[in-house]
Amino acid sequence: MTTRTSLPAIDDCLEAYLAAHADFGAEPFSSADLADRVDGFDPSEPTGAHRLDLLIAYGLVDRIGDDRYRIRCRPDESVARWQERSVERAATVRRLVADRTAGHETPSNDPEPLSHDGDSFASVFVSEQDDVETVATTAAAALARDASLSGIVLRGAGSRADHLQQITDELCNSDVVEHTDLEQSFEKVVSDVVGESKDTLEFRSFLRITQTAES
């Protein structure tokens, strides 16, 4: 059983997390922004930097860019929602452990791609706070690291299917390349819902890279 003594500096991390939620909500913030709101927190000091690392490790905060952060889940969200948001992290850690025990290391911390009709699609997890620019940045980075991918699969809680459908439609619009990091738009392949109960359903939308005229 996990106790407070087995979670280093958990009380300090909870204080910082709750302060971030109270002041920023779903909006991004910097370490300096957080320091202005939490007494005794200095990100330039080793203890402050360590607290930021722990906030991320505990799944309370996501790092979304260079010194840019955002809370992962609201305090009042359901247990199922917190579990859904932890799937990506757990899958990544598990794969890295498997890679190590198999006798080799991997520099990648990407979630596992999914296969459909023999093609491989990069997993891109989408939260309710994510907009098309955020998702496009994640997708572009994943595709740049693996040229063999046929596209991406957007993944999120089944209860957020409408939001994922909206992101899907925007990524399939050719105009998306004009205001995001993407070099090509996508075309929708198929959507699916998987899971054993209504509280753990995951919505998946497979998107294939649009072929250029030259190809």
Image: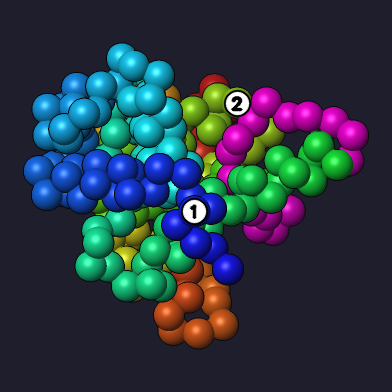
Mark 2 residue crowding within 10 angstroms, few (<14) / some (14–19) / many (20+) = few
User: Callout 1, which amino acid?
Assistant: Thr
Q: Is residue 113 magenta?
A: yes
Q: Quadrant of the C terminus?
A: top right
Q: Is residue 73 magenta?
A: no
Who's the residue at 17% across and 35% down the image? Answer: 38
Could you say whether the residue bearing mark 2 is in a helix, strand or loop?
helix
Q: How many labels, in total? A: 2
CA gap, disc 2 to disc 1? 39 Å
Query: Could you say which quadrant of the image residue 144 lies in?
Result: top right
Could you say whether the residue bearing mark 1 is in a helix, strand or loop?
helix
- Left or right of 156? Residue 127 is left
- Find residue 115 and report its horizontal and vertical position in percent: 67, 54
Question: As displayed, is residue 77 above or below residue 100?
Answer: below
Residue holding disc 1: 5
Residue holding disc 2: 145
Instruction: Give 199 or 191, whichever is nearer the viewer.
Output: 199
Which range of residues does the magenta coloring cover? 102-118
User: Callout 2, which amino acid?
Assistant: Arg
Who's the residue at 44% across and 84% down the image? Answer: 198
Q: Looking at the image, which residue sits at the far front?
A: 5
Q: Earlier in the sequence, mark 2 or mark 1?
A: 1
The dot on residue 207 is none
Q: Main secondary structure of the magenta part?
A: loop
Who's the residue at 40% across and 19% down the image? Answer: 46
Q: Looking at the image, which residue sits at the far bottom?
A: 197
Who's the residue at 33% across and 44% down the image? Answer: 13
Q: Quadrant of the N terminus?
A: bottom right
- Find residue 163 and report its horizontal and vertical position in percent: 28, 60
Is residue 83 at least partly visible in the picture? yes
